[in-house]
Amino acid sequence: MKQPIAKIVAFIFVTACSVANTNTFHPKYVVQAYLIADNNLPDIRLSLTVAPGQKYVQREVAVPDGIMEVRLLNEHNTIEETFRYDYVDNGMYHPETAARVLPGRTYQLLVTFAGNNTRITAQTTVPQSFKITYVPEDTVRYNQEDPIRMMATALPADLNSKYLFNVISQDSINLTPYYMTQLDIDSGKTPEWYYNVQSVILNDSYFSRSGNEIELRVPWNTIAFYGRNLIIPNVIDENLYDFIRSSNTSDENKQLSSGYINEIIYHIDGGIGIFGSMSRDSVFVYVKQ
Amino acid sequence: MKRGIIVIILIIVISGLSFGQNTASVNGFVKDQTSGETLIMAHILLKGTTTGTATNTSGYYTLVDLQPGTYTLACTYIGYKRREITITLDPNQHLRFDIELVPEKLHLGEVVVRSKRQKEEERDIGVSQLETRLIYDTPFVQPDVLRALQLLPGVQASSDLSSGVYVRGGSPDQTLISLDETTVYNPTHFFGFFSTFNPDAVKNVRLYKGGYPAKFGDRIGSVIDIHYKDGNNKARENTISLGLLSSRLALEGPVKKGSWIITLRRSTLEPVLRTLNKYDPDIPENVYFWDFNGKVTLSPSKRDKLSLSFYSNSDYVKNTFEDSSTMHLRHGNNTGSMKWTHIFSQKIFSNFIAAGNYYYNVPRMLEAGTDYKRSNHIKEFTFKGNIEIIPNLHHEIDFGGLIGTREVALNDYYLQKKSYASSVSNVFADWYLQDTWYPSDHWKIEMGVRSNFYSSGNFLRFSPRGIIEYKPASFLQFQGAFGIYHQFLSLSENDQITGFDIWQSTSNGVNPMSGLQYLFGIKTRPFSNLTFDIETYYRDMRNLFELDPLIPDYSGLPYKQLFLFGRGYAYGLEITMQKQSKRLFTMVGYAYSISKRKFPGINHNEYYPSKYNRTNTFRVVFDYQLNRRWKFNTIFNFASGQPYTGPDGMTQIIHSPISSIVRQIMVINHINGKNMPDYHRLDLGFSRTGHFFGIGRSELQFQIINVYSHRNTWFYKYDFSGSMISRENIRLLPILPSISYTIKW
């Protein structure tokens, strides 16, 4: 929003730009892990941060010497089962054995290093599973008055679940007007994020409930392409909720002004990043012009 | 408690009255002879004595307990010719004597003769009286009340482009902005570039930077007390001012036993923006703002004055970013009030006001058929009264109260559905009592207490306040003050854009803010036309509450969970030197200030600098009347770089199941842990007064802003598009000439 203001003021004043860099840097460990209910335990990435003006090269920031495990905790917060991880490549660690992520259960991450006392720990409680039960219209006209609706099994209201939609285009040919007008014609390329658009986060209370069902409403601005779209409602845990809402940039925003930068909420001791979880289901919807 | 206060008042009043038998008094209004406008803070002195006083905010003065005899009454006001009148007072005579002063061509430099008490009052601790002419003499593109206040030590702006004021480390919502005793919630136009106060209507501006008296409440920081004109009750007067950004019109004139005034200002930048929008869609296609003020003042008797006033401001912005994305911003403030001023006797003066206030802010975003709308409003009805009693020469008692209702509402709509609604309705009641006691010519003690009651949450708060002054010599004055303050509203502001500001109220679980202030000052007058003042302060801010900016959706959340709760403190030192002579006005100000905040979960739970804190500021204002027609002024402004939050590292998020792209993430170690480069700017201005084809008076102003074209930093912009974060320095204005022409007839 500051950009338009700058441009308005530019007819009164002339603005100019210059490039500068900052220094003072201490690298931090970065964890990336997303547990999905009823899926196998995911690979986990461990890396280091780089200085603001430094180029980010995955191989150079990879941390290969972590001793990593994920623990399933019971209701008393003690360890029920431990899953060890092996280093693969490029900072990625893979579980030694395949195991299903249990909905509603709490998992703990522990990373240690041989020869020093550094410990990275984090904890996530996986949201309960849910299912899409009914889609009133599996073919919809773009930008009609009502948003796309679907019924799903409702999670307990007191959990105040947080919903986020992903829309993955299956046809990826004809862009909807909103995305078309944002397209950089000169580059001739469709931005990668158009193929998997992420919605804003909406609280459970925003949606209407009917018995054991909840009516989900998908915003039209998540539809980048006409045609067949895979719509994925996600219920995200507190870690992901805090991480996404406090992240300093969204997919489409590649620039950020200094007044809009805030701390990201990580919920990781000994490092930064995300150790989050979600439950999800999906449905195909055809969007016609 | 209540009974005790009544007893104290009665004792003071009765004792004052009994001691006053066989004595005389003189009272009345001080007015501009040409317009009949009452003059606030005019000085009245009985020549040859130390007895004197100053007019109150209604332009009223009273001198009581005078021995019968003949006196020379001297009356002075900056910008007016001094007037001396001989009066004779008989025993028990209570003379009503209105004084009219003639405006001077040379408005600055009047060497006024004042009583000891008046001089002290004028330089009360924490108080700055803004000369209205300074608003016109030091404009920034256009004359502006709040920008003129930014020249004072202890007052800061967020940038060249903002007329918002940050006083002594406080956020804007900690400053009460009072227009004719009614709160203004939306003081700026056009993304904060202009204040909403039409300079043609302004009569008087007083800034209480801290330690403000008990008659003001509901803010923990400071008060800007603005009074508009009543209108010319002698003759019709019209003023028109045309400009590229906005134009102003002021009409005023007499009615039977009174006056009226209408002022209107409207933006005139739409054609330019529309043209620019064709070339750059990011520039809003439709932006306009206006403000309107109307007032009728009647004096049905010598003891009564009635006024009916209405004030309204409005802003609208429409911007279509893409074919299917439109933003609408609409915000404004409407107030209406009726005021009855009644003089019960030469010792008792009163004001009663009934006022209504409506603030609204409705941003709306339409993006690919996805509709988001927010509506924030305040509806307020207030009835208040205050009574000033001057029982004798040693006491000035001021007490009053108010009762009212206030509704603060916030509604969110998403996808054609109401997603959040909160409405806090309150009955609120305040009362205050203060006594200014002059035990001798060397001492002044002002003690007061204010009580606030807020029905939502059943909050009852008491705020004791006090000021003590000691003057060991005619050129030296020591002052100390303390005060406890409470605040029941909070403004969550968007950094630069007023269109997204949200006012919220205390309620169950959301306690009022509280603040404690200590002030100490030394005021000196080494020469009759030179003052040199030092003031220090410490402020404690508790229960700060503001909307959590990171909550993406409020639906279903309890009211309390919308907020972050924190605390803060600020301290500083201000040095001011002012010199006034026949032609010259100079002000040199330096301020050192530290302001910090602490909110749980932010900055590792440690204090961090406020974003508006500038550690050192230094300003010089120089205004010189070259001759009857020409005037020259210059302003130099230096300030330490503003703190900001910048990246201390970066990482990438890849392989995310909720996003198919690689995202650059900034790593932040400290909130506002970095500082922008120091800020400095020099402005020059010339003005020439003359006649406009014999029809009326005219003034041509020419200015050069940022004479040496130093490109100060506005903000940094970070680019994430590559595999590293790059930074762009967005700079403020270069050298900028400005010209304006005003006609008055």
Image (cartoon, coloured by chain):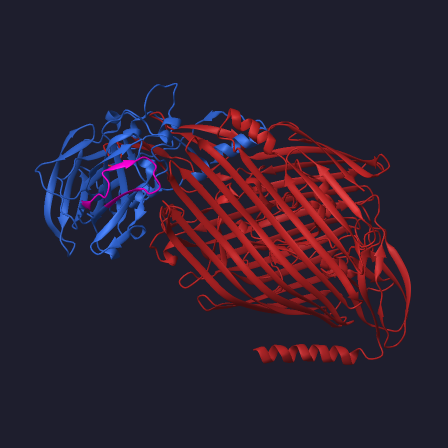
The residue depicted at 26 percent of the width and 42 percent of the height is A270
Percent of width and height locating residue A110: 18, 43
The quadrant in which the C terminus of chain B is found is top right
In the picture, measured across the screen, residue A85 lies left or right of residue B519, that is left
In the picture, measured across the screen, residue B288 lies left or right of residue A192, that is right
In the picture, measured across the screen, residue A153 lies left or right of residue B653, that is left
The answer to whether residue B661 shows anywhere in this view is: no
Residue A147 lies in the magenta stretch: yes
The answer to whether residue B256 shows anywhere in this view is: yes
Percent of width and height locating residue A247: 34, 39
Residue B534 lies in the magenta stretch: no
In the picture, measured across the screen, residue B494 lies left or right of residue B737, that is left
First to last magenta residue range: A133-150
Say which of B278 and B130 sits in front. Answer: B278
Q: Is residue B240 above or below residue B71?
A: above
Q: Quadrant of residue A13?
A: top right
Q: Quadrant of residue B720?
A: top left
Say which of A37 and A99 sits in front. Answer: A37
Q: Is residue B608 above or below residue B74?
A: above
Q: Is residue B538 above or below residue B494?
A: below
Chain B appears in which tint? Answer: red
The residue depicted at 64 percent of the width and 60 percent of the height is B337
Chain A appears in which tint? Answer: blue
Say which of A74 and A172 sits in front. Answer: A172
Percent of width and height locating residue B703: 70, 32
The quadrant in which the N terminus of chain B is found is bottom right
* Outermost left residue: A97
Percent of width and height locating residue B248: 69, 41
